[in-house]
Image (cartoon, grey):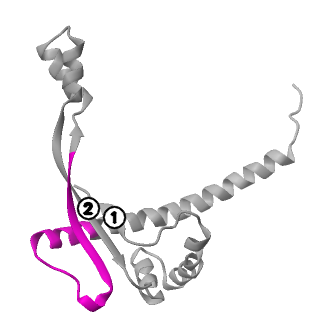
Amino acid sequence: MPKPRTSRKLADLTEQMVGYRRVYTTYNRLANRAKRRLDETATGVGRMLNERDLVPPEDSGLIIRLWHEDTKKARGMKRGIREFSQKHSKYGKILQGMIDKSRDVQRDHLTFDYEYELCEEDCVKLLMEMGLSEERALAVYSVSEGLGDDLEGFREGPYDILLPR
């Protein structure tokens, strides 16, 4: 059996993949923690806004609005097929009609923003609440401070989140 040839290019590309995976998994874990906390907090804030007539203090610089959207949600195919099979065994039009049926659903959205920048102390505190030491939180904050400017697609202005059901 012939000896396989070595390839420096293959080695370089494999090293790049290892590096990309490390960056991706590290930042993805941090992003997933932040997303879970965002969803939990938004759900609580949405509940507060829904149950009571509350607004933030005028001088806070905070913008928050709960709004509802009426929309149609398609029925699941499995359910339609099951119903069809039970009622009409041969008619394709009837099956398509059942699948195309929809029902009304109300979706809750929360739109929020802050007119100022969050201070370093607040950002570091949030990172520490996500499980980072103070030293790591400071390091992540200093790196990420300008990262949004460097990455395309970073969006300023109000953020809209669909509240989990």
Query: Does the magenta-highlighted stretch encompass residue 53?
Result: yes
Quadrant of residue 125 in the image? bottom left
User: Are there few (<14), some (14-19), or many (20+) residues within 10 Å of tag 1?
Assistant: some
Closest to the observer, 39 or 14: 39
Q: Residue furthest top?
A: 90
Closest to the observer, 38 or 72: 72
- In the rendered image, the vertical position of residue 22 relative to residue 115, given as above or below: above
- In the rendered image, the vertical position of residue 134 relative to residue 109, given as above or below: below
x and y, in percent, of residue 64 in the image: 27, 75
x and y, in percent, of residue 66 in the image: 22, 67
Question: Element at badge 2?
Answer: strand
Quadrant of residue 19 in the image? bottom right
Q: Amino acid at mark 2?
A: His
Residue 109 is marked as 2
The answer to whether residue 68 is left or right of residue 23 is left
Closest to the observer, 29 or 90: 90
x and y, in percent, of residue 30 in the image: 48, 67
Q: Are marks 2 and 1 in contact (CB under 8 Å)?
A: yes
Bounds of the magenta segment: 42-71
Q: Amino acid at mark 1?
A: Asp
The answer to whether residue 25 is left or right of residue 101 is right
Question: Element at badge 1?
Answer: strand
Q: Residue at x 20, y 8 (%)?
A: 90
* Residue carrying label 1: 160
How much space separates mark 2 and mark 1, taking CA atoms?
A: 7 Å
Quarter occupied by the C terminus: bottom left
Q: Residue at x 26, y 61 (%)?
A: 109
Q: How many marks?
A: 2
Say whether disc 2 or disc 1 marks the residue closer to the N-terminus: 2
x and y, in percent, of residue 51 in the image: 10, 70
Q: Residue at x 19, y 22 (%)?
A: 82
Q: Residue furthest bottom?
A: 59
